[in-house]
Image (spheres, rainbow, N blue to C red):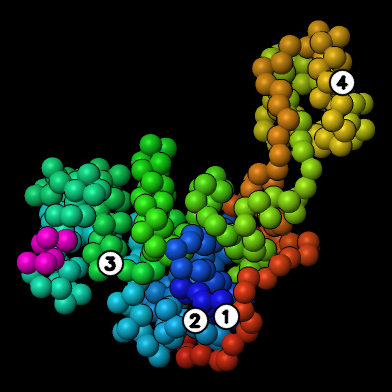
Amino acid sequence: MTYAFRAEGLVKRFGATTALAGIDLAARQGTVLGVLGPNGAGKTTAVRILATLLSPDEGTATVGGLDVVRDAGEVRRLIGLTGQYASVDEDLTGTENLVLIGRLLDIRTADARARARELLAHFELAEAAGRTVKTYSGGMRRRLDLAVSLVGRPDVIYLDEPTTGLDPVRREDVWGIVRSLVGDGVTVLLTTQYLEEADALADEISVIDHGRVIAHGTPAELKQRVGGRHLDLRPLDPARLLESAAILAEVAGTQPESPTRGTLTVPVEDDGMLTAAVRRLDGAGIAVAELSLRLPDLDDVFFTLTGHGTAAPATATASVSVTKAPGAAGAAGPAPTEETVR
């Protein structure tokens, strides 16, 4: 199988801290690989290696068949990178930022200006093209940052938590951009802490914790690993939560959990459990604000694999069996460089 990018056995240490402990990542052309993990899991470190900004201590990585260390200059012509925070120059206009990047990529000035106009129109920034970026809103800066990563028409784009700090509407805008890129044949590596983002965009997902890939597969495959359905209940009167929990425990034969205040959830083993729960709740005179039967989502997957949520730093290693991403450990690489571990 041919991969747009591939990392095998990547190890990266910063002093006594091991940011990556031998991860494998790979994506086919024209697909989205979601890399999911909490703060400190190693997502950004992996991106920086694939983007030629860091050298691995061990292992290998290639983009378009080119080694990211040995062929760094050629790799940079194939990739685009958008970090967690907009990195555009606030004292330049939108047009000037894009033209500057074009010139740095050896694009002729006239062609760079044409490309800037094209991208500004695509990202709905044409009216603000002549304004300095310091006058842009946060969403506008993020869109300009994405535009900058596309100036050179890259084959592979790394989006490192691209929707951090955006409101839901702007987040949906970025999702639409990602989908259009993939439709044009671009390969995307997307790191995120938003589980619904990975579910909405990724063809395959690698879950990272403690610098290791602890699970890999399609969203559907990862959900199947958790298995089962859940009955979720929120009584209209919060004072009747304990009474509702007792009813669910009798119906399901297991004690329900309360993942958020005022709600209850219990595994469903029998198709008749929902009907039985409704009858028991109605008989007890308990009105419900919400009652639903749902399949597992990526929140369930992540918690099952790691024992914690994506927002919190990793504190435990998963004890479930996992499927590795494609690839195997590689040879030792160049010496490490300093970087904040993320």
Q: Residue 63 in the image: x percent, y percent?
A: 43, 78
Estimate the spatial distance between the alpha carbons at disc 2 and disc 1, rounded to whole Å: 6 Å
User: Within 10 Å of the Cα at label 4, are there few (<14), some (14-19), or many (20+) other Cα atoms?
Assistant: some
> Depth check: 108 or 312 in front?
108
Q: Are marks 2 and 1 in contact (CB under 8 Å)?
A: yes
Q: Which mark is residue 153?
A: 3
> Depth check: 312 or 15 in front?
312
Q: Secondary structure at mark 1?
A: strand
Q: Is residue 193 visible?
A: no
The kind of residue on which mark 3 rests is: Arg
Name the side, left or right, on which 336 lies relative to 152. right
Which range is magenta? 110-115
Q: Are marks 4 and 2 in contact (CB under 8 Å)?
A: no
Estimate the spatial distance between the alpha carbons at disc 4 and disc 3, rounded to whole Å: 58 Å
Mark 3 or mark 4, which is nearer the start of the sequence? 3
Q: Secondary structure at mark 4?
A: helix
Question: Residue at horizontal 63%, vertical 84%?
Answer: 329
Q: Which mark is residue 114?
A: none
**Residue tagged 2:** 61
Mark 1 or mark 4, which is nearer the start of the sequence? 1
Question: Residue at horizontal 54%, vertical 57%?
Answer: 203
Q: Secondary structure at mark 3?
A: loop
Mark 1 or mark 3, which is nearer the start of the sequence? 1
Q: Which mark is residue 8?
A: 1
- Is residue 242 part of the magenta span, yes or no? no
Q: Are marks 4 and 3 in contact (CB under 8 Å)?
A: no
**Residue tagged 4:** 276
User: Within 10 Å of the Cα at label 1, are there few (<14), some (14-19), or many (20+) other Cα atoms?
Assistant: many
Question: Residue at horizontal 46%, vertical 68%?
Answer: 29
Estimate the spatial distance between the alpha carbons at disc 3 and disc 1, rounded to whole Å: 26 Å
Q: From the viewer's perspective, is the residue at label 3 or at label 1 nearer?
A: 3
